[in-house]
Amino acid sequence: MPIKLALLLMLCILLCTCSNSNNNPTFPFERSILDVSIAKRCIDGSSAPGANCYLIRWQHPIEKKDLQNYYIWLDTTVVKDSAENVQQWQIDAATAVIPYSGRGDGDSLDLTNLISEFLERDSLHIAIWAQYEGKQQGAVRHLSVFFGDDIPPSMVNFSDSASANTIWIEWIRPTDQWDFYKPEEINGPIAGYNVTIQAPAGEDIRDIPIILSLSGNNVNVPNLRISERFRKEGRQAVLAPAENNDPRILRFAITDGEGFDANNPKANEWKMEILGLKSEQSYSISILAWDIAGNPSAALTTRNIRTTDNIAPLIANEFWLYPDSGDGLPRLDSNRLVLFWPRSVDPLYEPTPIQLNSRLHIPPGCSPGTCYREVERYIVEYLSDNWEAIPRISVIPSDYYNARYRLENNSMVPDPIGEFISDTLRWIAPGESVTLRIRAVDSSGHYSKAWISTIQVSKGELWEKECPQGFMPVKGEEDIFCMERLQHAKGNIFESNVLYIEAEKACSDLGFYLCTERQWNAACTSRTSTYGVIEEREFFPADFLFRHCGVGTGRINERSKLCVSPDGIRDLPGQLQEWVTSNSGTPLLKGTSYVKFEGVSGVELAQCKNRFTPTRIRPKYTTDTVYLYRSGSRIDTLLSIDTLRTLHAILPPNQFTDTLLIYSLKSSAGVPIGRDYVNQAEYRRKGGDKWLEVLWQGLSTPEFIEPQQVLILGDTIINASNLFLDPTVGFRCCTD
């Protein structure tokens, strides 16, 4: 053998031998314990309130060959919290040793007895390590078990308002996670609040009155602890005296003791009234919440609040509106109501020579800067369930009410020194009754008295059409009809989950009829509306329909007055789909539900001309037409019709592949609505009678008629409108 070849052969043998000697090396991370965690749970699986039961749990290392024991150390007296390896003396001083059992994916140890002497601490360090036979070992894993509550409550977010001598502060009781191992429980008790009020130089506020209320009720005096403060002592919040030598500063504590009540939000509402202050002064107010474990909230809430002057602005109480040429009521211009009212002023001294009735009468010599100044702004609100800001398409600029107008020949014209102020209200429906509240605000923030007035708006071109109460006139293709303003309700509950025939009957019993598809289309496309709502400039369907109509949100009964058609019909998109009678006289669904339809754009679904026909998939079957092999030849009776039924006559019953179960169905009121059938195999597969209860939910108990042996040939879609019930479906009535 040549020398070169021999050397190559020896080198190959050497490399192969070396490779085989360490074919599967073990790395340190493969011998380190995985997924170490602490669970607050007793060994029997319970987790009773107040029980100090803790388990340490871990997953076995990747490498299990030669694994012998797990060692655990508590505290840092033996194994420091940064150690990666341990020595023999530390192994000998282990708190606990758990032999590797070789079973399952991991193991656990009940720490309850081992940690009993450490419970006064907030937390305890734990180290755990896997021991293998031999020198190569994994790294030490570290974690902590938490006993005390060291999680701060949420910060206090308060709102404020002020008058000349009083400041009102309102806040909601903060939430507090009181157990590290129960992050979902945020109702930990709040010990109370440290409050600091600081006045400008020269003002003594140490004896000013403070009135507290909780949930709308005045609380007892002991809740207010003047010159006391919460502080941490051990593992609880305690009250301690607070120095209060500065007359400009008032420090006090408010005791609470309750946790956040998610079931009764009103029970969490605190209100503080600070009286006896000076007018037109700025006061700094801060509030810090403390939980019962002595943790202050994560941040201190501080706000500077200014009191107003002593004299409120004067406001007149007379509107001027353009009348409609028909009924003479205030007219709408593309669902906009333009209104004018006399300007307000802020007197500089009292008694003021300015006289007030429906308008302001300013005598000669009383000029701006001498006996009054202009107000800074107006607040216009309308009454829904509560007083709400008038809906706007953008933020009101600071000079919004600076334009002035004067009345000339029964029309308002711009005039820099005119006495009228104007505003435009959008999304107003014909015939609507709008209740407004207007207040003037001076530069100090002092509000005028509220001027409240109700305006009945004209029906416009349809003013002569008389409709029943709760109905609105709508212009159809050839006539004017009346449609219910809202979906049909019984009492205060919108009717849903009704059959088409039940919707028809409900309207008929009242002397009306179920709206038709043509009427629905006329209502929802009024004035070129795409979605059955008033479409203003900067109208974004994806935002507006979800926010105001609830389309595809999954939330019901969050109804907005802005989800209204140009004719005043509410909730055509969103909320409930509605039964109508189609142009061909069959049942049909129109509108869009609050439920999200999978795979369909909610905006496209909300277009008014969309229509939905409830259908069900049923097996297509035959009792006398079959495929048959006979005498080696195939006879296809789908192509060669067996008119004499000879094949059916000779076909034995066991050749039919399934059975149909035929039922007679009635409405909940006992009215017959037809037959329906189900495949017996499907019936068994989907749960039997319980499946039928879901399939025909809300109907009377179906009457079983007969089974029929059939040959299933496939699926067919049948109209199931008469059998269709759903909680997202309602209706509304119409009349001529």
Image (cartoon, grey):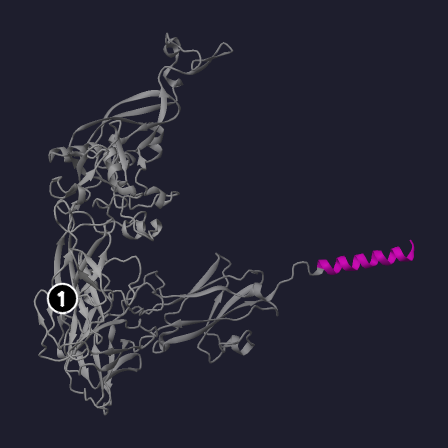
Q: Residue at x 22, y 73 (%)?
A: 160
Q: Is residue 351 visible?
A: yes
Report which quarter residue 605 is drawn in: top left
Q: SS class of the residue under badge 1?
A: loop
**Residue nearer the viewer, 589 or 531:** 531
- Determine whether, in the image, residue 90 is placed left or right of residue 439: right
Looking at the picture, how far across and down is residue 652, in whole percent? Answer: 38, 14
357 in magenta: no
Q: Is residue 389 visible?
A: no
Q: Say if 594 sits above or below 651 in the image.
A: below
14 in magenta: yes
Looking at the picture, how far across and down is residue 437, in whole percent? Answer: 16, 62
| Chief SS of the magenta region | helix
Q: Residue at x 32, y 63 (%)?
A: 184
In the picture as drawn, the residue positioned furthest to the bottom comes out as 245
**Residue nearer the viewer, 568 or 697:** 568
Q: Say if 86 sits above or below 563 in the image.
A: below
Mark 1 packing: few (<14 Cα in 10 Å), some, or many (20+)? Answer: some
Q: Say if 700 sits above or below 635 in the image.
A: below
Looking at the picture, how far across and down is residue 496, in whole percent? Answer: 21, 41
What is the span of residues highlighted in magenta in the rendered image? 1-20
**Residue nearer the viewer, 547 or 394:** 394
- Determine whether, in the image, residue 124 is placed left or right of residue 571: right
Looking at the picture, how far across and down is residue 471, in whole percent? Answer: 15, 42
Report which quarter residue 400 is drawn in: bottom left
In the picture as drawn, the residue positioned furthest to the front comes out as 409
Tag 1: amino acid: Ala
Q: Quadrant of the C terminus?
A: top left
Report which quarter residue 693 is drawn in: top left
- Determine whether, in the image, residue 76 is placed left or right of residue 728: right
Q: How many marks?
A: 1
On the image, numbered disc 1 is attached to which residue?
450
